[in-house]
Amino acid sequence: MSARAIRYCEAFLRDGLQGWPDQVSTGDKLRMIAAIDAAGVPEIDLTAFVSRRLVPQFADADIVLAAEGDFLRRVLAVTPDGAERAVSARQSVGRIDRCGIPFSVSEAHNIANIRRTHAEHREAVARMMDILVAGGIAPLFGAVTAWGCPFRGLLPAEEAMAIAAWGVERGARVVMFGDTTGMANPASVRRLFTMARAEWPNVELIAHFHDNRGLGIANSLAAIESGADTVDGCLGGVGGEPRKVELGLSGDQGNTVSEDLVATLAAMGIETGINPARLCDAGKLAEDILGRPLYSRVLRAGLASDVGEA
């Protein structure tokens, strides 16, 4: 893999906390944002405009979005109402750069997760994209369960490409392929990202992997090798899709660990603009705030570059 620059997005505040069982205070979220920004992270997935009743973790979205820092600000919405709330927040806080819209490649997963068939979801997503564009926010089209789901098992790359193609045809210029339940492997990642890069040379491609089968870093590297522009990760490896019995999910659905992945990229000469030691500081703060050890290996073993120093 030849060295090149890659954008990194930190998802702790949104994907990391969305299923966390305890409410994290707004003050602690602002402390986390400051620590992540101090590490030089160029993009942060900050919050979601979803039901405050179902996900009270994000009831403070406007305050979190107003945090200081010079980084791209990403949010999530799953309904037209959520898109409208994002636009209203942008008007009040002054800046939201992009809003993720998830679209499960597996229709069975889409129905179980957000109660919409593909046809119904296309209608809702089209409305959301129109709302966001009119409000000055770039839609981030997320083709999730891109490699498989609990209902159908492994999925062919052609199905993920077809869903993503609809999003691009509808106007999306940022496309994420998400491994929602950790079913990708480096070979299947290379195949999908190679196809997408050839098909859409001017579309930003984002890779988002969950690590519940231990392949998060390997899959992220395969995506970068095959044309991904941006990779996501989460401090401590928390989050991912919450455990849902009705979705047939079990075990830990954690995200790829930011500290470990960024340290790997730095060691390989892949430029992110992030200071790995400062990112580890943010990881330690995350452990303090959540009150438990998390999953970063470099926090336990130390950065390889520091080994042997007096």
Image: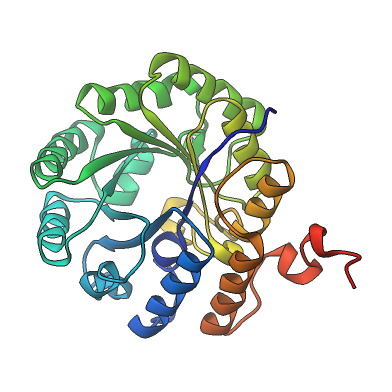
Answer left or right for 76 relative to 239. Answer: left
One can see residue 127 in this view = yes
Residue located at (51% from left, 32% from top) = 228
Q: Does residue 253 lie above or below 225 as drawn?
A: below
146 or 243: nearer the viewer: 146
x and y percent of residue 106 in the render?
Answer: 39, 34
Q: Is residue 104 left or right of residue 222?
A: left
Position of residue 75 measured from the top left corner of the image (x, y, whole percent): 29, 56
Judge left or right: residue 117 versus residue 92.
Answer: right
Q: Residue at x 70, y 28 (%)?
A: 1
Give the residue furthest to the top: 198
Is residue 214 at least partly visible in the picture? no
Taking depth in this image into account, of 77 and 62 the one nearest to the observer is: 62
Q: Quadrant of the C terminus?
A: bottom right
Q: Residue at x 21, y 66 (%)?
A: 51
- Counting every numbered tag in the picture gives 0
In the image, 264 versus 291, the foreground residue is: 264
Corner quadrant of residue 274: bottom right
Picture quadrant where residue 110 is located: top left
- Residue 236, x across and y down, in percent: 60, 66
Residue 172, given in percent of the width and then of the height, sits at 25, 31
Left or right of 123 on screen, residue 231: right
Q: Residue at horizontal 56%, vertical 71%?
A: 282
In the rendered view, would you say 2 is above or below 264? Answer: above
Q: Nearer the viewer, residue 111 or 73?
A: 73
